[in-house]
Image (cartoon, grey):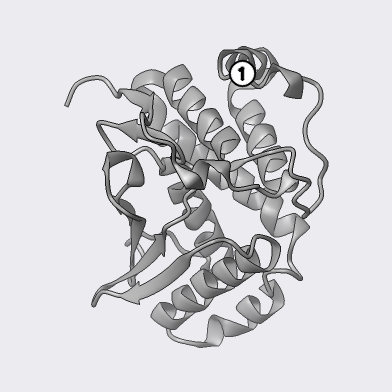
């Protein structure tokens, strides 16, 4: 496949209009700034129509103020992929991992992270499932409109969402939600101390009704 092409969908996407938690955008912006620097972040924000966020990041609050929508996160994701070019997949995964660290630090109670630490005595596959469930339950608490599921696919767990922030309102010639792949990787690394193969296998930007990530039940060999 040639260059990655991302466009706005011709038909309105209801998911793009959903409100998003202020802190989620803030953590993504901080993570992106950590990777591309202040000047790079300013350039991206201007390019994607979010110049009003320059030196004015949303508050570090797990609240839905109504000022930010899924489309804002999707525009940020698309802007970063354009900024990174051929390195877009690996670099946005890095942004996702850094963003996840902010989340782990800020919302341990919301996600029941103490219980996840205690789960380390369980089989690794069970630990993964508990981590994914904790993440989804945390999202449901602050954004009741999310539509999420977990599915057992034999040697892999599937994380499924009908309400993906990464590609809301977008269409593309490839999967584009790699930022969330990084979020999943970092959460599971923090939880288990191990790395896992994680692949986005379906993407709403390519016409699928859902975005799906498959997570190996076995860690990578070190």
Residue 69: quarter of image: top right
Q: If the image is split into quadrants, where does the C terminus sit?
A: bottom left
Picture layout, residue 222 above or below residue 167:
below
Q: Name the residue beneath numbered marker 1.
A: 49
Residue toward you, 140 or 60 = 140
Within 10 Å of the Cα at label 1, are there few (<14), some (14-19), or many (20+) other Cα atoms?
few
Total residue callouts:
1
- Write the residue at 55% across / 60% down: 187
Residue toward you, 220 or 111 = 111
- Write the residue at 16% across / 27% down: 1
Residue toward you, 54 or 205 = 205
Residue 111 point in image, percent of width and height: 67, 69
Q: Is residue 93 left or right of residue 108?
A: left
Residue 205: quarter of image: top left
Residue 89 point in image, percent of width and height: 38, 34
Is residue 165 among what the camera can see?
Answer: no
Residue 175 point in image, percent of width and height: 31, 40
Residue 13: quarter of image: top left
Q: Is residue 109 left or right of residue 121?
A: right
Check the image and name the residue furthest to the front.
11
Picture layout, residue 122 above or below residue 200:
below
- Write the residue at 65% across / 47% down: 19
Picture layout, residue 220 above or below residue 12:
below
Q: Secondary structure at mark 1?
A: loop
Q: Is residue 193 left or right of residue 213?
A: right
Is residue 217 among what the camera can see?
Answer: yes
């Amino acid at each position: 496949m040639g260059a990655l092409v991302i466009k706005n969908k011709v038909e309105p996407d209801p998911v793009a209009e959903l409100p998003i938690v202020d802190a989620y955008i803030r953590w993504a912006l901080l993570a992106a700034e950590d990777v591309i620097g202040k000047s790079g972040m300013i350039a991206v924000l201007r390019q994607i129509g979010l110049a009003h966020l320059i030196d004015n990041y949303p508050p570090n609050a797990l609240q839905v103020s109504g000022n930010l929508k899924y489309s804002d996160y999707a525009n940020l994701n698309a802007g970063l992929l354009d900024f990174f070019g051929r390195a877009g997949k690996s670099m946005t995964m890095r942004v996702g991992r850094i963003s996840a660290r902010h989340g782990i630090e800020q919302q341990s109670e919301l996600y029941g992270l103490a219980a996840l630490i205690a789960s380390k005595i369980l089989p690794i596959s069970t630990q993964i499932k508990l981590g994914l469930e904790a993440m989804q339950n945390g999202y449901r608490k602050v954004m009741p409109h999310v539509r999420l599921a977990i599915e057992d696919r034999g040697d892999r767990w599937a994380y499924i969402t009908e309400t993906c922030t990464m590609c809301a309102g977008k269409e593309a010639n490839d999967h584009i939600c790699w930022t969330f792949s990084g979020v999943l990787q970092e959460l599971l690394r923090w939880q288990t101390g191990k790395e896992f193969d994680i692949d986005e296998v379906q993407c709403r930007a390519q016409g699928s009704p859902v975005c799906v990530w498959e997570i190996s039940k076995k860690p990578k060999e070190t």
